[in-house]
Image: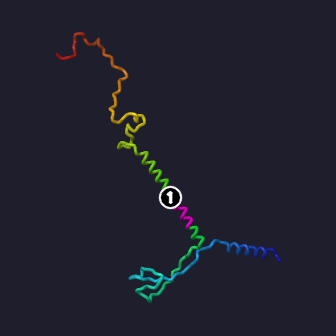
Amino acid sequence: MTKTPVVALLYLLLLAVLSSSAPAQTQRREAQIYRCGPEGRQLQDSPCSDKPTGTAQSVAFDQPSATQQREARERAAAERKQADRMEQERLQAEATQRKNQAAPGRIDGLASPAATPGAAASSPHTKPQPKKPKFLPQRNRSSVPAGASSAPR
């Protein structure tokens, strides 16, 4: 006996074992439907009441296996959890943004002077005090004659 037929036989045996353990595939199914209604736009799985002698039509469809149905349910549940988590993150971000924008502002979008940290101590109802000049101008009294008065007579 040569090695080539033995190797081929082992290869076929291995292929048969692996193909039997492959995941379940969708199954091709058929169903009988009846077209009912005025223009045949209603589809039913039982004969029509208005046309008891109507003929059934065969419709082929793919039926997912139990494994595929379970995986689809798990995937939908995981996506639902992710969507809920993303919604909570969005709501928190919106709340933070509303909180940060709650301070009154001007029409140009800049914060009002009362909203600045340095002005927070002063009350918005108090009138600001005028600033004192850093230096007082000195009058030169020598340029005005002693007898001259600035008031009109």
Crowd rating for badge 1 (residues with CA inside 10 Å; few <14, some 14–19, many 20+): few
> Which secondary structure, mark 1?
helix
Q: Residue shown at 25%/11% (left/top)?
A: 145
Q: Residue shown at 44%/89% (left/top)?
A: 53
Residue situated furthest left in the rendering = 153
Verify whether residue 131 appears in magenta.
Answer: no
- Please provide percent x and percent y for residue 11: 74, 73
Residue situated furthest top in the rendering = 146
Answer above or below: position of 47 versus 115: below
**Left or right of residue 103, residue 29 in this image:** right
- Please provide percent x and percent y for residue 74: 57, 65
Kind of residue at disc 1: Asp
Q: Nearer the viewer, residue 109 or 127?
A: 127
Answer above or below: position of 85 versus 55: above
**Left or right of residue 77, residue 141 in this image:** left
Verify whether residue 75 appears in magenta.
Answer: yes
The colour scheme used here is rainbow
Residue 1 in which image quadrant: bottom right
Q: Main secondary structure of the magenta part?
A: helix
- Please provide percent x and percent y for residue 135: 36, 20
Which residue matches tag 1? 84
Q: Which residues are magenta?
A: 73-82
Answer above or below: position of 119 versus 136: below
Residue 134 in which image quadrant: top left
Which image quadrant: the C terminus? top left
Q: Residue shown at 53%/62% (left/top)?
A: 79
How many circles with numbers are drawn on the protein?
Answer: 1
